[in-house]
Amino acid sequence: MPIPHYLAMTGAEMAGNFMFPHHTAWMACHFSPSGTGLSNLPKWLPDDSLLILDDSTPMHDHDPEKVAAELGGCMERLPCVGLLLDFQRPDEEQAQKLAEYLCQALPFPVVVSELYADGLDCPVFVSPISPDEAMESRLSRWHGREVWLDTTMEGLEIVLTEKGAASAPLPPWERPDGGLEDKGLHCHYHISLDPDKAVFTLWRTPEDIAAQLDEAESLGVTAAVGLYQEFRPLPGEEEGVD
């Protein structure tokens, strides 16, 4: 059976939807910009949903006990399978302490971003694997830990000149159609040659992600989280009403 692939939806996406993925994630929850608790906790979720708390608003002096109480109350009231702390601000001491506190205080599974997972006894949420990077190598750091994988479809452009190579993220709107498939890296690529440079463009399709998840499962990954807007739904999986 494939590992669960949670598709993260905004509040607007959920409000205008009557059909939901088999595994839904709520990604609209963040620290309140004007109080000590949380904003945008969901009022309803489909069965077996994942609740995501992000740090798009910095934590600052939010009260950990109040945050834990609000999250715990929400997860008791709604059919949540767990909480994902999608914290992406390195070296935020207060957020680190909050992650530690929530892992201990909540009687629910708590998954923590890899930026904050060192020293914690919880599943680790690994950021998207670059299309030029082998999955086994990328996951080796977390050997022995339960791993969840971020499947946001990031692309990459590598420019090779006589001075060396430089790489930069590829915006979604610049991903070419077609391309060649690399089954080892689970990506598609295109090569453009000019007199003074070679440009390698790499990106992933939903089909590439499906293959990536097959390998991820063989490497011990237990779940994945992607964006609903990129997967509607995965190939071969039908959406259902929850």
Image (cartoon, rainbow, N blue to C red):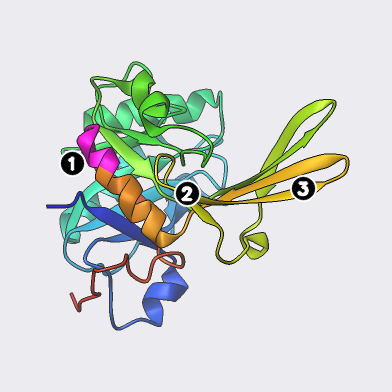
Q: Are marks 3 and 1 in contact (CB under 8 Å)?
A: no
Residue 26 sits in which quadrant?
bottom left
Image vertical order of residue 91 relative to residue 187, above or below = above
Mark 3 vs mark 2, CA separation in Å: 20 Å
Q: Nearer the viewer, mark 3 or mark 2?
A: 3
Coordinates of residue 18 in the picture (x, y in percent): 30, 83
Using residue 192 as the reference point, say whether residue 178 is left or right of it: left
Counting residues from the N terminus, which is met first, the one under dot 3 or under dot 2? 2
Q: Say what amino acid the circle numbered 1 marks.
A: Phe
Q: Residue at x 33, y 69 (%)?
A: 233
Reply yes or no: does residue 189 show up in magenta: no
State the SS at label 1: loop
Taking the view exactly as shown, the residue that stands out farthest to the right is: 196
Residue 141 screen position, x and y as percent? 38, 19
State the residue in front, 161 or 147: 161
Residue at the disc numbered 2: 187
In this picture, is 20 found above or below 135?
below
Q: Which residue is mark 3?
A: 193
Q: Which residue is mark 1?
A: 108
User: Could you tell me the amino acid type at mark 2?
Assistant: Cys
Element type where label 3 sits in the image: strand
Judge left or right: residue 13 versus residue 173.
left
The part of the chain drawn in magenta is 215-221
- Look at 18% across and 41% down and name the residue there: 108
Q: Quadrant of residue 241?
A: bottom left
Q: Residue 19 in the image: x percent, y percent?
A: 28, 80
Q: Earlier in the sequence, mark 1 or mark 2?
A: 1
